[in-house]
Image (cartoon, coloured by chain):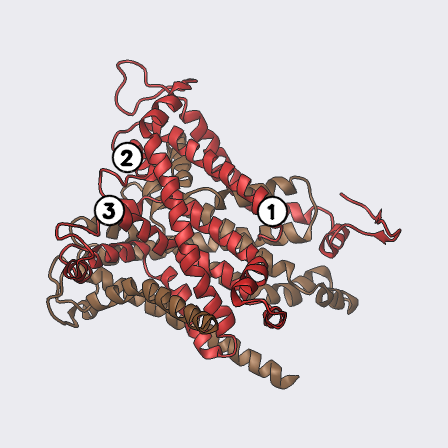
Chain colours: A brown, B red
Amino acid sequence: MKQKLGRWLIPVVGGLAFVYLLVPIAYIFAFSFNDAGRTNLEWRGFTWDNWANPCGAPAVCESLANSIQVGVVATVFATALGTCIAIGLVRYRFRFRNLTDVLIILPLATPEVVLGASLLAQFLNLGWELGYGTIVISHVVFCMSFVIVTVRARVSSLDPRLEEAAADLYASPRTTFWKVTFPLLIPGIVAAALLSFAMSFDDFIITNFNSGNYQTFPKFIYVAATRGIPAQANVIGSAMFLLALIVVIIGQVMAHRKRKALEQAQ
Amino acid sequence: MSSPVMTKEGKVRDLRSKEEIRAERRKGRTGVYLVLPGLLVLVLFFALPVVVLLAMSLYTRPPGAEIGQFVPALQFSNYATVLGAYWPELMRSFGFALIATTLALIIGYPMAYLVAVRLRERKLLQGILLVLLIAPFFSSFILRTQSWKQILADEGFVAQTLKAVGLLASDGHLTATAFAVVAGLTYNFLPFMVLPIYANLERLDTRLLEAAGDLYASPLTTFRKVTLPLSAPGVFAGTLLTFIPAAGDYVNAALLGNNRNTTMIGQVIDSRFFRVIDYPGAAALSFVLMVSILILVTVYIRKFGTKDLM
């Protein structure tokens, strides 16, 4: 009896938890087809119009374009700076190494509202005008820690014998890095960049503190929430979700193929 | 830096990890050049802002000054003022975050176990569920929170059904309650709980579970004595990744709560900054929040911590 209970308990609880996780996403998707008019609160009938014309509601696409632009620029900087730090920290000894460690971990242990508030205090202090520039800076700061943690794990798990083999074959340190180390790090760097973009794209709290009048997609939805979110926002949300799903599935399939190929080779 | 030491058995053992030994061979300036640009960003836009925040928390508004005009001072009474006024919100934030973290652990652990252990042989289903686990990261979290608001709304299907069955009083609400805020927090940070536990359970050697069973351990005992201790680092990371953002969150409280008994500290900091234009008060509260979390996290790490967190 007890055995049976144990066998069923986990799939049932786990399955229900997945439903809990996906209900709002299904809701967003369903209501992207709602013939909503201005407030997308109750079901008024099926339509393709929102998908045919996702920029139909004012400010939806402008804020989306802004968010993508911020996300891309912040990701490029965060990934470049973070990757360098990760390599430096794992592979080299230098002074201030422990200090650097603390400075990386602390932003991860700081709630967003405090990061946002401290950056705002800094910008007010410097007298900088809030807008595109200040958002990008704040996103680079909080994305960088995630990049460092992700890439660092990859650098630490690299088999050092590969680099030693390259050195044994008379490759210069520079050649070894670009021909051996870096290509091995690419999956980690790509994962870090994707994570960084997702964090930046979805960030509301830090952005809200440091954006002034600059509109981003999360900010637009938050403000619109009080008046009713246009169905076009659901279209964008669903489309982003589907796009990410496709990217992740392609990644999974490629990893699966690679595994298969490796198994066969052995 | 530690050097080779003699162990009890008299063997010479090098305490440094292989990684450290290798790294030592490559001293030099390259490391500094690699780290310097990023470090500069962290110093200028993380460390320094925290110092500015601390300084600003002690500013004072001279009599007769305009709104938003503050002068540097050492007015420590700012802290007493805001703590006196917002102590309940601060405690509530930690309370909500604690409940949400506990719930996320109770819900998230079976999810992680299901995907990582039970479905280990069924790669396709495992892959699909893993994708679904990461997927919420890519759909706007404010949009999802707002969806909960609409799903749980008074005229919505869920509330109506609960009322029909009698589980909810006919004049009861699901939204604008503490319940909704905690449910929202649990929901939003659930993947942060599940993913680290998953990463840990994925490496779990199931033969150990069989061995425990062979030794007549009940499934519950096996879980308590084998599975849980082995996945402790994942649970540890997951609870931190859930608790810290939940304690500072204000989107859930703003969208799913009310103005009476669900206000969280993040909302107060936001409104002190932008509505009341009380920079010192907002800065003081931010600083209190940051320090309290750091203290809590440190105590937690000391008590349950493992070294291989990162």
Residue position marked by numbered label 3 in the rendering = B177
Residue B144 position (above or below residue B269): below
Residue A18 position (above or below residue A69): below
Chain of the residue on which disc 2 is drawn: B
What kind of residue is marked 1? Val
In the rendered image, the residue lying farthest to the bottom is A264
**x and y, in percent, of residue A219 in the image:** 28, 49
Residue nearer the viewer, B53 or B248: B248
Chain of the residue on which disc 3 is drawn: B
Q: Which one is earlier in the sequence, the residue at label 1 or at label 2?
A: 1
Mark 3 or 1: the one toward you: 3
**x and y, in percent, of residue A167 in the image:** 76, 65
Disc ID at residue B271: 2
Can residue A216 be seen in the rendering of this structure? no
Residue nearer the viewer, A11 or B167: B167
> What secondary structure is found at the residue carrying circle 2?
helix
What kind of residue is marked 2? Ser
Q: Which one is earlier in the sequence, the residue at label 2 or at label 3?
A: 3
How many residues crowd mark 3 within 10 Å: few (<14), some (14–19), many (20+)?
A: some
How many residues crowd mark 1 within 10 Å: few (<14), some (14–19), many (20+)?
A: many
Residue A7 position (above or below residue A218): below
